[in-house]
Image (tube, coloured by chain):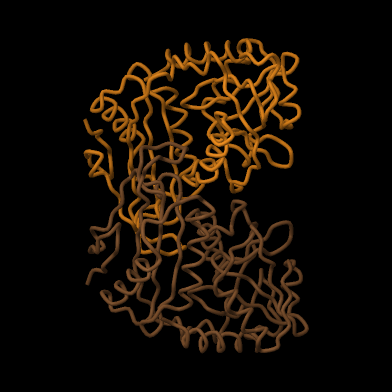
Chain colours: A orange, B brown
């Protein structure tokens, strides 16, 4: 059965879900997005995603074509129409369609698109038991990674580099320091302290990151928000990633080096449990 | 009258020219493009654009959905159908539509879109007589600017910053050195020598740049391909830009500093004349 997709006010079969070739999302990557997980038919960490969407729009001086209430209602309607128990909802807003010009168009109506992806193995992810393997690649993305834009070609290329290397994902590195994963935040644990890069324009301000760090501090774990090197990561006691669709996943190999004994560590395991428990409680 | 636009094998009225919301050009900026000028109904510097398109596709391991001969034929058909005497033809190829995944899809058909823009004042550009004014802004683009991708949000933001500053365009600057303009290459002239940044992954390999440097050398002008600073630019005898739709345009103000006496210089003027003459001769 074809999915139902939301495009600019209409619920359409996915085959008919189209945008103008003049849409600035297509011509200029002039668009922002969010991905929200669905567990048990409910939206995980939704207020965080809604808030970050507002910030992305604001940083780009882009108007929203719908109110926050309308956007939430579309999420819920798509979950319902597509019968999503476990999966993802993708949302994209662009500056809209106008004849091609680097200058922002006057009076264009922003475009809004939402679609669902049914997934199994989000909550019960086999990779949570085995951990994932990552390579390190240079971080060649633009300088405003704090804005969640659709300029995702480099993360896509890095994922393909990981695939060619026979591993699961890539960590991005700038001046010898890890910035983050291709579509997730990166962490190491050393001597009982969780280390993850501080917020800045260099990394995405992960919604799952914020929640996980809050839970870690509430559980009396030590957290240091600072940059770390690839060598530190290889020498860590544990490593893991967080993201809206992976929640918390252990990393057991970094750029060819086995992390500790190569088994998922207790910190990642515990944080995944807490995150799933708490976020399910708060899911809406 | 509505333009005729080419989309994946069909010639369509622009209102019907659409792509799937699952197109990776829309979701990941996973697409490349070219813009070719039309003068007197003929394509300017077309072989250069066709060759660069092949290179962009190859760098991204993206297949072309049409042969070079077919792509040229579509250009000509659109010129004819839209009665373009003077204007631009925009071409975009993306990795095609597939359910959203950072990994490249297996078996997706690349998308191809072409449209025209009728323009006056390309050959007889009033800015060629007055020159343009630019500001300098940090170059925050990704690290592979040699690939002509649709990740154009930052150039668009830089153009808007120029507009807000009341000037025409922006020059991008990295580590104090000018890389290029928002959608053009940047040059200064000092003591009779034309200076423009050397080719690398840091700048677009401009088709007009290559032609203009060739003409300059044939005319016995001195050319140095090297990086230059903003201060050097402000202190230059002349400055100009080149690009497929501007050809050669003098720059008379850089980041608030008047270049020499503030009038277009003889080198830019001469190179514009040569470029227009030679490229019209070779137009096809």
Q: Quadrant of the N terminus of chain B?
A: bottom left
Residue B94 in the image, given as x and y percentages of width and height: 41, 52
Q: Nearer the viewer, residue B189 or A206?
A: B189
Q: What residue lies at 33% left-to-right and 45% top-to-bottom?
A: B21
> Is residue A244 placed above or below B220 in the rendered structure?
above
Q: Quadrant of the C terminus of chain B?
A: bottom left
Q: Nearer the viewer, residue A72 or B103?
A: B103
> Is residue A103 placed above or below B247 in the rendered structure?
above
Residue A76 in the image, given as x and y percentages of width and height: 29, 27
Q: Does residue A35 appear left or right of residue A271 in this picture?
A: left
Count of marks placed on residues:
0
Residue B100 in the image, given as x and y percentages of width and height: 39, 37
> Is residue B171 placed above or below A165 in the rendered structure?
below
Residue A236 in the image, given as x and y percentages of width and height: 72, 20
Q: Nearer the viewer, residue A50 or B7?
A: B7
Q: Does residue B242 appear left or right of residue A111 in this picture?
A: right
Q: What residue lies at 39% left-to-right and 61% top-to-bottom?
A: A105
> Is residue A126 placed above or below B191 in the rendered structure?
above
């Amino acid at each position: 059965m074809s999915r139902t997709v939301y495009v600019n006010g209409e619920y359409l079969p996915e085959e008919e879900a189209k945008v103008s070739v003049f849409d600035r999302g297509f011509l200029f990557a002039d668009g922002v997005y969010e991905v929200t997980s669905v567990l048990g038919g409910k939206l995980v960490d939704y207020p965080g995603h809604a808030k970050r969407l507002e910030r992305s729009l604001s940083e780009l001086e882009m108007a929203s074509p719908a109110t926050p209430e309308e956007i939430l209602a579309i999420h819920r309607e798509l979950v319902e129409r597509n019968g999503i128990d476990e999966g993802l909802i993708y949302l994209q807003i662009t500056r809209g369609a106008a004849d091609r010009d680097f200058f922002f168009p006057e009076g264009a109506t922003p475009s809004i698109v939402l679609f669902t992806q049914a997934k199994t193995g989000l909550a019960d992810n086999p990779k949570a038991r085995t951990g994932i393997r990552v390579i390190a690649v240079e971080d060649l993305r633009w300088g405003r990674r704090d804005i969640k834009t659709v300029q995702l070609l480099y993360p896509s290329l890095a994922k393909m580099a990981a695939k060619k290397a026979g591993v699961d994902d890539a960590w991005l590195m700038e001046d010898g320091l890890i910035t983050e994963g291709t579509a997730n935040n990166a962490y190491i644990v050393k001597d009982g302290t969780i280390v993850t890069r501080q917020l800045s324009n260099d990394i995405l301000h992960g919604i799952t990151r914020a929640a996980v760090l809050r839970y870690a501090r509430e559980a009396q774990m030590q957290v240091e928000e600072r940059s770390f090197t690839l060598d530190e990561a290889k020498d860590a006691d544990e490593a893991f990633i967080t993201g809206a669709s992976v929640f918390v996943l252990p990393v057991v190999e970094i750029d060819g080096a086995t992390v500790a004994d190569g088994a998922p560590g207790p910190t990642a395991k515990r944080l995944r449990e807490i995150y799933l428990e708490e976020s399910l409680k708060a899911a809406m």
